[in-house]
Amino acid sequence: MGCCQSSFFPGKDHRPARNRARPSNNGEVLPAFSEFSLSDLKSATNNFASDHIVSEVGHNAPNVVYKGRLHNRHWIAVKKVTTIAWPDPKQFAEDAWGVGKLRHTRIAKLIGYCCDGDERLLVAEFMPNDTLAKHLFHWENQTIKWPMRLRVALYIAEALDYCRAEGHPLYNDLSAYGVLFDENGDPRLSCFGLMENTRDGVGMLEYNRNGMITPESVVFSFGTLLLDLLSGKHIPPNHSYQTSCRTLKEKIEEEKVLGICIQTYIRNPHQGEALDMIRGKNILPLMDSHLEGNFSTEEATVVSDLASQCLQSEPRERPSTKDLVATLAPLQNEADVPSYVLLGIPKHEEAPPKPQPPLSPMADACSRMDLTAIHQILVMTHYRDDEGTNELSFQEWTQQMRDMLDARKRGDLAFRDKDFKNAIDCYSQFVDVGSMVSPTVFARRSLCFLLCDQPDSALRDAMQAQCVYPDWSTAFYMQSVALAKLNMHKDAADMLSEASALEEKRVRGCRGP
């Protein structure tokens, strides 16, 4: 009998990898990386409804990002990309898995993907406080304070340096739209730009002669991000930069914006005179007027000089990501002030936990990893939950069937007598014939495997039980215990919660309205 894939832990080998859930730098257990089904993501986004769209980026190959909510109540961001950008589903999956391994407090985590037919979707944790572009260019209440701009610069530099150290030095379209703010107001680098594909709607990047992004190109883009933070201005990627030197001088005098000048120079290298003007010592006319002078000229000069270094025409003359961090770290004079204060947003308050109903005997035994108690429950339950899973014709009652049922009976006797190795052998004879499926046999053999210190086999049997009986709480309970034995504690807790919900639903159904 073939096994369907668990909706919780879809993976390349139909079971969770052992390293999916792991602690972050601060000890927090992070969500497992998963392959999501298209139906799950449709449900989370109300079938990709237009009112769930939070951004549309990329002028060459438009990508849409939706806000969604999973069945476990976690908010997610779902990015739809095109098959033009990712024609090979295997490559898309492999790159997603690579980015999914990156875990750092400065990066919005990629927690999954979906590759279904022509659909290519990326799933990340949702950042609820908008993008840097929104706060910097389209603010309604107040502009970003100077210390917060310095914090953004440092945090993104730290994110890029971490990615470089982890073997992911490339980033597509680094801009103010790729900087997100989490529930505490801390800036994070969007994980979506780490997917290495230059056909994916890039904008403000410099390329080498072969049209490829390089680590030096990413530093170049970081320089344009620093200019955005200094000037508070942004030039859309589709702006026309075919401007004469005379017209450029007029723009400099008119707007006094460093970002416009540098970005114009980027598009037209012949306008070297503009770059000479920008690198003048007086940066005050170039600063964001909305700061109203509330910034340190010395600090702004350091940032401006760093931006100039990042924008060197010769890639090898640009600083490394480690240099970026070393330059920006000493400028953090208000490091003790929470980000939500600097950003001007309300403090994030954790919702009080909902009162939990008392655990059922099975849930309690699984939560305590009490295999003896689980054994007693399965013995008492016997095959009550197998009703309706098999309908056999008269012709199927052959000698082979009688032998198979005899093997199950011998397995039951061994299971009752705690002869678990013998029970595994007998149950395996029953399963291998394949004429009759029994979720209870899989659950019992799963427990036998656990008691024989074979958690991988136990997890496989528990998932087989779920395939036979998709809403059977016992199958989920056994998966939770096996996952805990595999040290996947976050996944085990999620599975235990799902099992309890299914058991409660069944109890309510038995009670009636």
Image (spheres, rainbow, N blue to C red):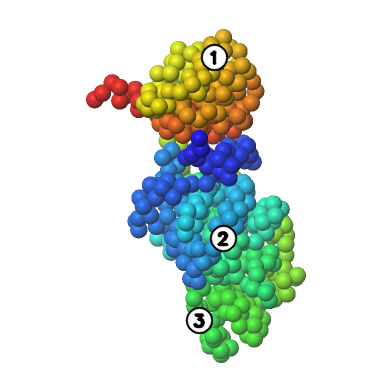
Instruction: Tell me which corner region of the image, top left, top right, bottom left or bottom right, holds residue 318.
Output: bottom right
- Residue 199, how many percent across, how many down? 56, 68
Task: Identify residue type, mark 3.
Answer: Ser
Residue at the right extreme, as displayed: 316
432 relative position to 208: left or right: left
- Residue 401, how many percent across, how many down? 47, 23
Quadrant of the snapshot with the C terminus: top left
What residue sits 61% from the left and 83% below the top?
A: 268
Task: Identify residue type, mark 1.
Answer: Arg
Task: Identify residue type, mark 2.
Answer: Asp
Q: CA distance from mark 1 to mark 3?
A: 80 Å
Q: Which mark is residue 410?
A: 1
- Residue 117, how many percent across, how many down? 47, 56
- Is tag 3's residue or tag 2's residue first in the polypeptide sequence? 2
110 relative to 218, above or below = above
- Residue 110, how many percent across, how many down? 55, 50
Instruction: Tell me which corner region of the image, top left, top right, bottom left or bottom right, holds residue 287.
Output: bottom right
Instruction: Using a 10 Å C-alpha cutoff, classify the residue at mark 1 as few (fewer than 14 neighbours), some (14 to 19) or many (20 or more).
Output: some
Q: Secondary structure at mark 3?
A: loop
What residue sits 46% from the left and 34% below the top?
A: 467
Q: Which mark is residue 240?
A: 3
Q: Secondary structure at mark 2?
A: loop
Q: CA distance from mark 1 to mark 2?
A: 50 Å
What residue sits 38% from the left and 47% below the top?
A: 43
88 relative to 272, above or below = above
Residue for badge 2? 88
Q: Secondary structure at mark 1?
A: helix
